[in-house]
Image (cartoon, rainbow, N blue to C red):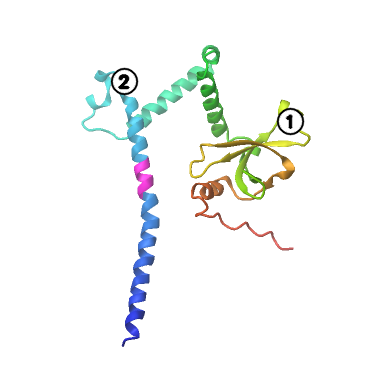
Amino acid sequence: MSEEKPTLFKRFRSFIKANLIAGLLFLTPLAATFYFLKFTITWIDRILLLIPPAYRPENFLPFPVPGLGIIVLFFILLFTGVLVRNYLGSKLVALWEYIISKIPLVNKFYISVKQLIETILNGGSKDFKRVVLVEFPKDGVYSLGYVTGVAVGEIQQKTKKKVLNIYVPTTPNPTSGYYLVVPEEEVIPLEMSVEDSFKLLISGGIINPDETPKKNKK
């Protein structure tokens, strides 16, 4: 009997541990996603404050409608898109960007944000989706990086080898990082997807992507 008690206790402890972890793995991302969506919808709903008080939805509806700001934002974006895509709108946009370009600091920020949005919406070039390893910050130490393109102009002309533009993000915040110019032959290409690389990056190596698929045997 003395030998069975530890065995039963260990089984019970393993049962508790396994199910607690399973529950945590399921509910944590679910709760985080729920609160993220709630925060986003609440924040977007503030766009309703742009409407004059007398014409706000709560004056006509018997109860508040969460997410109504998203519908309003949708129509604002749609109307703005129609406006800026016609001849007169494109001229006004060009004039606006000309004025912005003459304002120090503001022009750099505006251009950077615009380029980022254009890259995201257009899906980027083929090179933008490449995940690579580069020796950084010193020889023998490797960092995860993303190829954003082939260097051109003066940078390419003054290098003896073909060089690539590499963005090396930081962990766990990938929005900050380093811009590197690396010879193409010194870049180690990876087969993992951008999504898998971000999981690896943000988790600091805790979440590893699936193993590289084996090549089909002949």
Mark 2 closeness class: few <14, some 14–19, many ≥20 residues within 10 Å: few
Mark 1 and mark 2 in contact? Answer it, CB < 8 Å: no
Residue 60 visible: no
Specify whether 3 is left or right of 126: left
Vertical placement of 72 versus 212: above or below? Answer: above
Callout 2 secondary element: loop
Q: Name the residue located 67 percent from the left edge and 47 percent from the top edge.
A: 139
Q: Which residue is mark 2?
A: 51
- The magenta span reads 31-36
Amino acid on which disc 2 is placed: Ile
Q: Which residue is mark 1?
A: 156
Camera-nearest residue between 158 and 218:
158
Q: Name the residue located 53 percent from the left edge and 30 percent from the top edge.
A: 117
Q: Residue furthest bottom?
A: 1
Vertical placement of 127 versus 105: above or below? Answer: below
Amino acid on which disc 1 is placed: Gln
On the image, which quarter does residue 101 sit in? top right
